[in-house]
């Protein structure tokens, strides 16, 4: 951790650069998410861009860089919260066009609430729970390596070179895959096992498997380590090795089997197992987090009292005073209430929905912050959290308004939009606060810049959606908005009575079983625990994402078992950080010309090199293992 006295953090150039990057990254990620169904975490890219720009100034430092990436990544996070939910209002016909003012209000208020919720969560999850936050660690490593290189230390130069080489490797693979389409993003396939149940029933049992050829996901797995990577993979196996084959056997009418069929079964049916497990896991996580959350709030209150009584608080422990957080949250209910009364036209129902939103906002901000600590914000199942919110909200409104209510479905979506914005901001900002904790930043200054970045993005996202909808029509083949389509299906499914409740309930039962297993492990004193949310996220995610995370975790396990040198452990962390950095930067770089030119085919298509993608992916994994497992010459001499 850095402790070099007081360095300037919030400067004019840092604020200006943070606002600009927040808007740019929010717009780029909004397009990318609507187009490809995913967004790119911007903490590391923002840190790298910030270092490059601030290096042009005579006076700049690591804490300024950290402030910039904090504001910039807030924009990217808010983009995810908006595009996963708000387009559903147009898709269901409640809105005929995107309302710029309404989008700015919904996303801005939801995002600010998410920032406020991260303030007591910082102590609870980063200090008390000591979660990894892999992308936060990676961001801190990038910032530290850049700072060391600027100060011209030998170690700093070596660390920068490690990050540089691995970032180039990860970035080039991303460019070849996502830009030039030289190979598919995943190596996947499906097969069927024929069966004859009786003379009336025959078919094929569907099995699907695969892996994403993503070095960044391997890096995430390396950072989170063996336990979490195994649990995410186990969740994937529950869906793909058991649930899909069992469902296809029961249905029994699949004569032709391919990966599209397996994905269709997973997305329309089996994925809801993950929703049920995530709901149970979210409730259980909050129960388990109550103690550290209360401790965090008490610590914040104590810090506030000490400040009032003149006791000096260490700079690196100063959050925004908890008193002002509470006041701000109370006042935030007013704009939330005004948003709902426009939809429902009943002040009693609008007030109830406002309270529900605040409860769910806190609940799922804590869950999102916790999950970001396990698997990183890029792989954080924000859409799963949002589905759970929309599900509960739809049921509540169904009981009040009855079936077939368009206003009820729209109200549930807006609750989901506010909660999704809050949870997305909470998860990503906890990564930023983890990075700040490592490099010695002042928490309250980061929290202020999170709000600055959130407001900047909120003002830009409404216009961005309006432009994109005018140019392409969101919901068309060009911008399919997959998450928003799923949210629409859940909300309308409740009011129309066609939601797959059996899968949600079975997922909840699976979640309870996993919790019991974890409690048994705890009682035995085992160091291999089974946190429910790690398994639930594996059930919810495609198996192609779980496999590379598992590979990274196994590389970390076997390499560290072979060589426990602290220097090699750090080298592995830098290596993994570089892979994440390169892919994240290149993901945004690929999206920018597509966004500017409005041409999704801007990059030339050079397909037909699937074999090369597989070889290079395996090569990256072998390179990582060899780099962190073999003893250096100096180490041999010491032995």
Image (cartoon, helix red, strand yellow):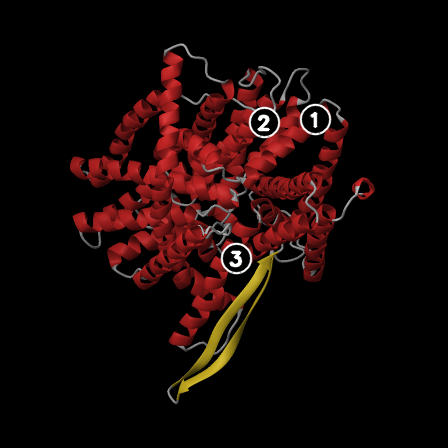
Tell me the element at label 1.
Answer: helix
Q: Residue at x 47, y 78 (%)?
A: 204
Q: Residue at x 27, y 30 (%)?
A: 333
The answer to whether any part of residue 383 appears in the image is yes
Q: Quadrant of residue 144?
A: top right
* Residue labelled with disc 2: 439
Q: CA distance from mark 1 to mark 3?
A: 37 Å
Q: Would residue 363 be found to the left or right of residue 243 on screen?
A: left
Q: Quadrant of the N terminus?
A: top right
| Marker disc for residue 233 | 3
Q: Say whether disc 3 or disc 2 marks the residue closer to the N-terminus.
A: 3
Q: Position of residue 205 (x, y in %)?
A: 47, 75
* Residue labelled with disc 1: 148
Tell me the element at label 3.
Answer: helix
Q: CA distance from mark 2 to mark 1?
A: 12 Å
Q: CA distance from mark 3 to mark 2?
A: 32 Å
Q: Is residue 527 above or below residue 438?
A: below
Local packing at callout 2 (Cα closer than 10 Å; few below 14, some 14-19, many 20+) is many
Which residue appears farthest toward the bottom when viewing the image?
A: 199
């Amino acid at each position: 951790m850095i402790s070099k006295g007081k360095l300037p953090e919030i400067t004019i150039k840092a604020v200006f650069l943070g606002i600009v990057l927040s808007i740019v990254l929010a717009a780029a990620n909004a397009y990318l998410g609507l187009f490809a169904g995913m967004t790119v975490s911007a903490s590391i890219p923002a840190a790298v861009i910030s270092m490059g720009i601030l290096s042009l100034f005579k006076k700049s430092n690591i804490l300024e860089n950290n402030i910039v990436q904090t504001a910039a990544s807030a924009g990217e996070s808010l983009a995810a919260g908006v595009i996963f939910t708000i387009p559903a209002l147009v898709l269901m016909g409640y809105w005929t066009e995107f309302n710029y003012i309404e989008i700015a209000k919904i996303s801005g208020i939801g995002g600010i609430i998410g920032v406020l919720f991260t303030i007591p969560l910082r102590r609870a999850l980063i200090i008390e729970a000591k979660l990894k936050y892999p992308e936060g660690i990676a961001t801190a490593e990038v910032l530290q390596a850049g700072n060391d290189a600027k100060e011209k230390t030998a170690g700093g130069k070596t660390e920068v070179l490690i990050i540089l080489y691995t970032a180039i490797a990860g970035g080039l693979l991303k460019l070849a895959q996502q830009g030039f389409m030289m190979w598919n993003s995943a190596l996947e396939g499906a097969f069927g096992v024929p069966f004859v149940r009786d003379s009336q029933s025959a078919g094929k049992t569907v099995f699907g498997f695969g892996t994403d050829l993503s070095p960044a996901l391997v890096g995430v797995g390396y950072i989170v380590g063996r336990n979490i990577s195994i649990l995410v993979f186990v969740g994937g196996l529950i869906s793909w090795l058991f649930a899909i084959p069992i469902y296809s056997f029961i249905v029994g009418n699949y004569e032709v089997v391919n990966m599209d069929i397996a994905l269709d079964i997973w997305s329309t049916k089996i994925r809801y197992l993950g929703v049920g497990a995530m709901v149970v896991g979210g409730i259980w996580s909050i129960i388990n987090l109550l103690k550290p959350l209360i401790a965090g709030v008490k610590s914040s209150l104590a810090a506030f009292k000490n400040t009032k009584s003149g006791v000096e608080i260490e700079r690196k422990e100063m959050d925004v005073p908890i008193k002002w957080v509470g006041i701000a949250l109370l006042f935030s209910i007013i704009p939330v209430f005004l948003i709902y009364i426009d939809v429902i036209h009943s002040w009693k129902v609008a007030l109830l929905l406002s309270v529900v939103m605040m409860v769910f906002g806190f609940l799922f901000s804590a869950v999102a912050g916790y999950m970001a600590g396990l698997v990183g914000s890029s792989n954080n199942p924000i859409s799963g959290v949002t589905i759970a919110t929309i599900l509960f909200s739809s049921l509540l409104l169904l009981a009040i308004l009855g079936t077939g209510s368009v206003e009820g479905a729209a109200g549930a979506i807006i609750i989901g939009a506010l909660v999704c914005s809050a949870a997305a901001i909470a998860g990503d900002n906890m990564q930023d606060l983890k990075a700040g904790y490592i490099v010695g930043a002042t928490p309250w200054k980061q929290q202020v810049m999170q709000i600055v970045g959130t407001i900047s993005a909120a003002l830009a996202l409404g216009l961005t959606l309006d432009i994109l909808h005018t140019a392409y029509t969101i919901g068309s083949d060009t911008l399919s908005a997959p998450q928003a389509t799923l949210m629409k299906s859940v909300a309308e499914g409740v009011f129309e009575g066609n939601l797959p409740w059996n899968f949600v309930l079975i997922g909840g039962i699976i979640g309870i079983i996993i919790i019991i297993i974890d409690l048994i492990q705890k009682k035995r004193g085992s160091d291999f625990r089974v946190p429910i949310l790690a398994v639930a996220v594996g059930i919810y995610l495609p198996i192609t994402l779980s496999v590379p995370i598992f590979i990274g975790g196994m590389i970390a396990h076997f390499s560290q078992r072979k060589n426990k040198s602290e220097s090699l452990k750090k080298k592995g962390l830098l290596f993994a950080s570089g892979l994440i950095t390169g892919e994240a930067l290149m993901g945004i770089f690929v999206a920018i010309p597509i966004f500017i030119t409005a041409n999704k085919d801007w990059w030339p298509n050079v397909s037909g090199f699937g074999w090369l993608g597989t070889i290079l992916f395996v090569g990256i994994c072998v390179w990582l293992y060899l780099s962190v497992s073999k003893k250096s010459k100096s180490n041999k001499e010491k032995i």
